[in-house]
Amino acid sequence: MSTFRNPAFTLPEYPPFAPDNPPTEAQHGVLGQLDGTWVNAPGIYGIHTTILPAPGSTSEQQFGTFLFKTQEYTEKLEFRKKTSPVRNRLGSNEQFNGAVNYETSICDRNGVEQHFEMGQYLWIGVWTHHGASPYDTPACLFSRKASLKDVKDNFTFPTLAEGAQGPQFIPPYSISRQGSIPHGNAVQLFGSQPLDPNIGIPYKDIPGAPVIADLWDEKSVAFDKTMGYTAEKLRKATNNTRVKPDIASYSVYQGVQPKDGFPAGTLDPNSGEAYMKRIFNATQQLNCSSGTVVTDPLFPYCVQPNLKLVDANKGLDIISHDHFTLNTNPPNSTGLQGGSLNNVAVDRYAKIFDIEVRVWISKVKDKQSGKIVDQLQYEQRIHFEFQYGVDGTKTKWPHYQCNTLRRLEDL
C-alpha cells in the first residue's frame, strides 16, 4: 500500500500516548473476521498444483525437467485472536499490534495428511489521514513526546529536551504474516486492503461476490512463461474456453529428431508444449470404499487452480466481501520487503523466489434458511527456482493452493 496523499487532508499527530494508561485491548482490523475454526463444506475441495525437481535431476544435468503433482484436499484452518496488544516502543512512536495465530492441517482426498503449518497474522494499523481506517478503535499508533522525567532518566539533555519528538512513522502496509513451514521455510509477507482512491480509506463490506480471475489469466495459471509456454498461447489455442488445446492429445516424440522436424501429432520433448501436456492431463488417484482405485481427472483446475474458487461461488447469494493481498515483494513498493528463509537443502534445490496470497471473506445468505454465514477463500501462489533455461536465465516453477472454507459451527 502506497502512502495516501490528498491536499484535502492534513496528517495530524497520532493520539498522544499516556504512559500510565496504555491500551489493554488489541485492534485486529479485517483480521478479526478470521477468528475461529474453518473447514471444507461437504463436496467442496481445495486444490494444489506443485512443480518440483524431477527425480534424478539436478541443475547441471538436464534443463527443464520437473515433476508435476496436483491433488484436491480438505483442510482444517484455525485462527485465534490474542486479546492483548503487542507493544513496540519506537521512541517518538508507540505501536500496538493485534496478533492472530493460525494453524492449518491439510489432507488429500484419501485422508492422508499432506501439509501442516503455523504462524501469525499481525494487524499493524492504517494511517493515511485522520479517520482513514474503519478499524481505529482502539488505536494502534500513538505519538510520544519526551517528558521531563524521560529527559532525566535517559540522559537526553541537551540534545533532546522536554517536548521533543521526532518524525512520526507511517506504516506502508496494514497487515503482515509470518509463517513456519516444516519443509524448511520461514516466510514474511506484507500487504493491505485496497484503498478507495478518492478518500484514502480501505474498502470494507464491498457489495457482491469477489472478483477472482478471468479464464486463463496469466497470474493464475499453474505454469510460468519462463517454462516456454504462455497464457496467451493457451487462450488462442482454446478460443478462450474451458477446453483442452490440441497439444494435450499429442504424443511426445521419443525418437531421434528427424531432419525436417517432428512427425505430425508429436511434440518436441524439449518444448513448452511437451511440459504442458502433463499439466493439461493431470489426474489424482482416489481410493473407493469398495477397495478399488479410481483415476480422477482434474482439468481445468490443474491448469488454473483458482477456477475452484470461481465455481464455488456460482449460485451463491453473496451479500458482501472484504479482501486483502499479501506479498513477499509487494508491487510498487520501494521500501521494506518480505521474503523467505530456507533450510540448506531447500535453498539449493527448490528455493522460494516469491509468495503472493489473496484472501476473501464473504457474507453469504443461505437460500433455504435465510441465515447469513461467513465464507473464507484464499489463493496462495509460490514460485520456486530450480534449474536454468537453455539461455542461462532462471526458470520460475509455480506452486498454487486454493480453497473455499466455512466456519465449523455453520455446517
Image (spheres, helix red, strand yellow):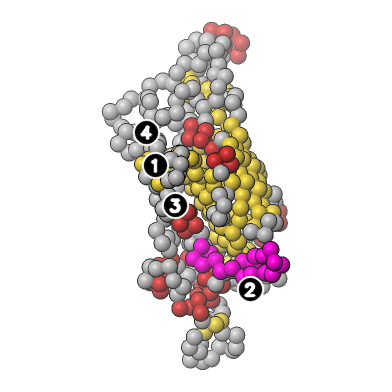
Q: CA distance from mark 4 to mark 1?
A: 21 Å
Q: Is residue 261 visible?
A: no
Q: Mark 1: which secondary structure?
A: strand
Amino acid at dot 1: Ile
Amino acid at dot 3: Asn
Q: Is residue 175 visible?
A: yes
Q: 341 above or below 99?
A: below
Of mark 4 and mark 1, the one earlier in the sequence is: 4
Of mark 4 and mark 3, the one earlier in the sequence is: 4
Q: Nearer the viewer, mark 2 or mark 3?
A: 3
Q: Nearer the viewer, mark 4 or mark 1?
A: 1
Amino acid at dot 4: Ile
Q: Nearer the viewer, residue 335 or 246?
A: 246
Of mark 2 and mark 3, the one earlier in the sequence is: 2
Q: 91 above or below 35?
A: above
Q: Mark 2: which secondary structure?
A: loop
Look at mark 2 in the image and give the residue it sits on: 62
- Mark linked to residue 201: 4
- Mark linked to residue 313: 3
Task: Identify the residue at horizontal 57%, vertical 39% (top origin).
Answer: 409
Task: Identify the residue at horizontal 39%, vertical 68% (top origin).
Answer: 241
Magenta-drawn stretch contains 292: yes
Amino acid at dot 2: Gln
